[in-house]
Amino acid sequence: MRLSSPHPFSIGRIFELAANLLSSRWLTLYAAAAIFLVPGYALMDVVASNFSPRFYIWVGQAEQAILSSTQFPPLPSDAVLVCAVLLAAVTVLLASGAAVQAAIIHAADATYRHSSAPLGASVRRALNRLPTIVGGMAIYYLIGAMILVVSLVPGGLLVLMGGPAAFVGLVVIVGGFAALVLLGVRVTLLQQAIMLENLGSVAAFRRSWRLTTGAGWRVLGYTVVVALLNGVVGFFVSGTPVAVFDLHPEIPRDVAVTTVLDGLVDLIVAPLTPLVFTLLYYDLRWQAGEPPLPEPPEPEPAADSVSEQQV
């Protein structure tokens, strides 16, 4: 790996490198994002506009019943179907997002290391590794669910008991959420391990855990900064129009518009997370004293490649 930029990378240097990579390959990166996100959000738009208003109407009725101390409304007759369809659409959208990150990681890594990664190659690589990525995400969500159950159930029961037990219950609940944050930090580099080291789901989970050991606060800091940047874009592109035009989740047309806006937000910020954390992955490898990744074959000169001097 021929890097002219000295390690360790500061946060400013990582975001500068990410901006350089984005400016040099923006067309490829955004095309890869659109290939996966547009179908995912098209499906979500259809499903959400047809099914989610029924759920929000029932929620509104339930809130009114609670506030007025009247009879609680019965669940809609198709409640199970609505939940199943919405869950399926959300799962597809999560997989689409994972594929976007995988394709961008592949393209950015090749560009940064003076290799050639056409759009088709990055998309094919992402699709090839997607089952492994989904497996790694499943492990993460399963462990997260177990942590929630172990902390919220006994913690909630202790809180309901009152007295000193309530304090213990709060400690248990807070501890559970702290464990979730720790888990999220430790698996931050899961996709990088899968895409760049060709590891399986379990091996990549362990690899990400090892790489982030001792760098937890740093990884958490990057996560917070990226989340804030995503939130700013979401506020202006989606949140503000929803508030200005008074869009309601009970109206199918408004749900469709909101879903399109959410998809636009995801498309705009799509390169940010994979670029930043791929560069952080390089730096954590260097700090661990590990050998560089195998050098990719020399590419033919390409207009959209970025030189390491520019990066």
Image: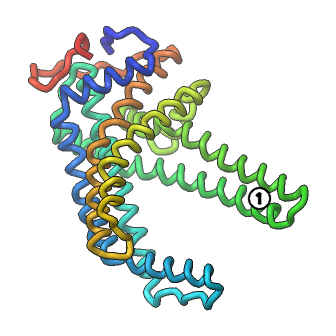
- Residue 210 vs residue 159, the one in the foreground: 159
Neighbour tally class for label 1: few under 14, some 14-19, many 20 plus, Cα within 10 Å: many
Give the percent coordinates (x, y) of residue 282. 41, 22
What is the residue that sits farthest to the front in this orientation?
244
Q: Residue at x 50, y 36 (%)?
A: 224
Q: Nearer the viewer, residue 63 or 23?
A: 63
Q: How many circles with numbers are drawn on the protein?
A: 1
- Within the image, what quadrant is residue 92 found in? bottom left
Q: Quadrant of residue 64?
A: bottom right
Residue type (three-letter) at the residue carrying disc 1: Gly
- Residue 150 in which image quadrant: bottom right
* x then y, percent, for residue 225: 46, 33
Q: Nearer the viewer, residue 257 or 274?
A: 257
Q: Which residue is mark 1?
A: 155
- Residue 107 shown left or right of residue 152 in the figure: left
Q: Is residue 77 left or right of residue 255?
A: right
The quadrant in which the N terminus is found is top left
Q: Is residue 11 left or right of residue 20?
A: right
Secondary structure beneath dot 1 equals helix
**Residue 22 image position (x, y, % from top left):** 24, 30
Does 215 sit above or below residue 137? above
Q: Which residue is rendered at x = 30% and y = 37% of the image?
A: 271
